[in-house]
Image (spheres, rainbow, N blue to C red):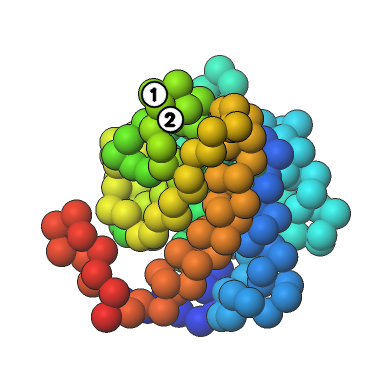
């Protein structure tokens, strides 16, 4: 099912926000048609990504998580997303697990980007994990979010070769370049509605 046009994105981030900026640039340059960023939300008031959003005139809201129960914090985020008529939630370096209630509030309408070829290397420091394991290919995955960590249906993956002269940092930098391409491509696919999901398989029509 395609999203209403324009699709209204809600970006959730906890840090520098380079994926958010790549999406914002693609929209500004007309490469991601039919969508706009309605709001950027962070669980950390000092996340640099919030400041970048404000500099671009994009609504940016901090919903501090510290000392609050997950479900209660998530309810406030859901309310903020609804207030801004968000119909596609994009996690972009959002370092918190979503409660089941959050996932159910936006069924098949929450995307995440993870810097590995899932299901390999879920969790933290995925690029370091891939490097230490001796993987010869690494990459990134954009997937729908379900109730398990780094687990939902895969929309798109990009492969990055691990080069002999790599260290984990260099590898992560090249993966990040691909992340910035992959996220906007995945958003465009989801907005188009030209796909079906059968079991775990995302099938383009
Ligand atoms: C990215 O590597 C993303 O894949 C992971 O967290 C990092 C966020 O980076 N989930 P940024 O804040 O978008 O620059």
Residue 103 in sight in this render: no
Query: Could you tell me which quadrant the C terminus lies in?
Result: bottom left
Q: Residue at x 76, y 38 (%)?
A: 48
**As rendered, which of 143 and 55 lies closer to the eye?**
143
Query: Could you tell me which quadrant the N terminus lies in?
Result: bottom left
Q: Residue at x 50, y 32 (%)?
A: 127
Residue 134 horizontal/vertical position (percent)? 40, 26
Distance (Cα) linking label 2 and label 1: 5 Å
**As rendered, which of 42 and 118 lies closer to the eye?**
118
Q: How many marks?
A: 2
Residue 160 horizontal/vertical position (percent)? 49, 48
Residue 169 in sight in this render: yes
Residue linked to disc 2: 130
Q: Which mark is residue 133?
A: 1
Q: Secondary structure at mark 1?
A: helix
> Residue placed farthest to the front in the image?
164
């Amino acid at each position: 099912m395609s999203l209403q046009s324009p699709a209204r994105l809600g970006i959730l981030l906890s840090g520098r926000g380079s994926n958010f900026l790549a999406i914002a640039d693609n929209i500004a340059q007309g490469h991601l048609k039919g969508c706009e960023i309605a709001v950027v939300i962070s669980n950390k008031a000092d996340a640099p990504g919030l400041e970048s959003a404000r500099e671009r005139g994009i609504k940016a809201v901090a919903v501090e998580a510290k000392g609050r129960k997950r479900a209660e914090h998530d309810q406030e985020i859901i309310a903020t997303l609804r207030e801004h008529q968000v119909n596609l939630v994009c996690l972009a370096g959002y370092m918190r697990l979503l409660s089941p209630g959050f996932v159910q509030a936006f069924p098949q309408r929450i995307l995440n980007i993870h810097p590995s070829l899932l299901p390999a290397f879920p969790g933290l420091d995925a690029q370091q994990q891939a490097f230490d394991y001796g993987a010869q290919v690494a990459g990134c995955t954009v997937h729908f979010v379900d109730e398990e960590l780094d687990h939902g249906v895969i929309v798109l993956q990009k492969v990055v070769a691990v080069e002999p002269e790599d260290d984990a940092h260099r590898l992560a930098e090249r993966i990040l370049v691909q992340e910035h391409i992959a996220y906007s491509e995945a958003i465009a696919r989801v907005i188009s509605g030209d796909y079906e999901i059968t079991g775990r398989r995302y099938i383009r029509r």
